[in-house]
Structure formats: C-alpha cells, structure tokens
Amino acid sequence: MTERLPLNIANIALHGLHLAIVAGAGIGWMFCETRLATLALQAAIALSWVVIGPLTGKSLGYCLVTDLQWRVRRGIGLAELPGGYMKYLVDGVTGRDLDAARVDRWTARIFAASIAGNLTTLAVFGWC
C-alpha cells in the first residue's frame, strides 16, 4: 500500500489540476482579473487538442494531463479507463456509462462557447 502512496497522491493532484483547468477554461473569462489567463489556457487546450495530439500520433482531442493521469492510474492498478477525462468525469457524476463520442461532442461545443464568450467579452469590455 505505501509503495502506491505517491501515485495515489499524484492521482488526486491531477484530479485537482483537471478540475481547475475545466473550471478555468469554462468560466474564467467571466471575471476581469482572469480573462487574459483564461484566453491563454483556452489557446493551450486548443493547441493540445488540434495540433499536439495529431503531430505526436495521438488522437484529435489529446490532453497531456489526461495522458499523465491515465499513466498514474494504470500504475495504481486502475486499468479500465475511458478515452478522455470528461467522459470519466461525467460518467462518475451521473453514475451512467454515456457514449464517448457524445461526451466529446458536448465537450467541444461547450469549449467553443466558452471561447466565444471570452472573445465577445474582450470585444465589448476589453481587458479591463
């Protein structure tokens, strides 16, 4: 048990990081103080999803944090992992096994709406 303690701690830390990324990219643009950081975070996510994944032979929608967390979770002995963190999160919250493609589509739509919200807010109110 103690030999897995560092991996368990890393898993919890990566959950926290994931939740911070999701919240930051989703609603960070609503606050003047975090608008610029949110735009940078959204750009990094889009870069990972659209450029880094395909360039490294991973899938479209690739996330470095998910890749790292899944490695940690496999090290703990948790082998049954969905393709993406959002499917894992939504399934865990709902208690259902939702269609991965549907979760990915909704994730992309919500992310696009968040980017649109950020750009619109920047156009109307500026950087603050």
Image (cartoon, grey):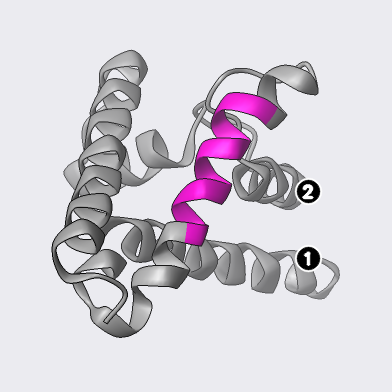
Question: Mark 2 near mark 1, Cβ–Cβ under 8 Å?
Answer: yes
When asked about the image quadrant of residue 24, the answer is: bottom left
- Name, please, the residue furthest toward the left: 124
User: In this view of the protein, which residue sits in the foreground, 79 or 33?
Assistant: 33
**Residue 59 x %, y %:** 62, 18
Using the rendered image of the protein, determine whether residue 60 is visible from the camera's viewpoint: yes
Using the rendered image of the protein, determine whether residue 1 is visible from the camera's viewpoint: no
Q: Residue at x 57, y 26 (%)?
A: 50
Identify which amino acid the numbered label 1 is placed on: Arg
The residue that label 1 is drawn on is: 4
Tell me which secondary structure the magenta stretch mostly adopts: helix
Q: Residue at x 32, y 63 (%)?
A: 23
Residue 58 in the image: above or below residue 127: above
| Count of picture labels | 2
Q: Which residues are magenta?
A: 40-51
Please report whichever mark, 2 or 1, sits nearer to the chain's N-terminal start. Answer: 1
Q: Residue 75 got which mark?
A: 2
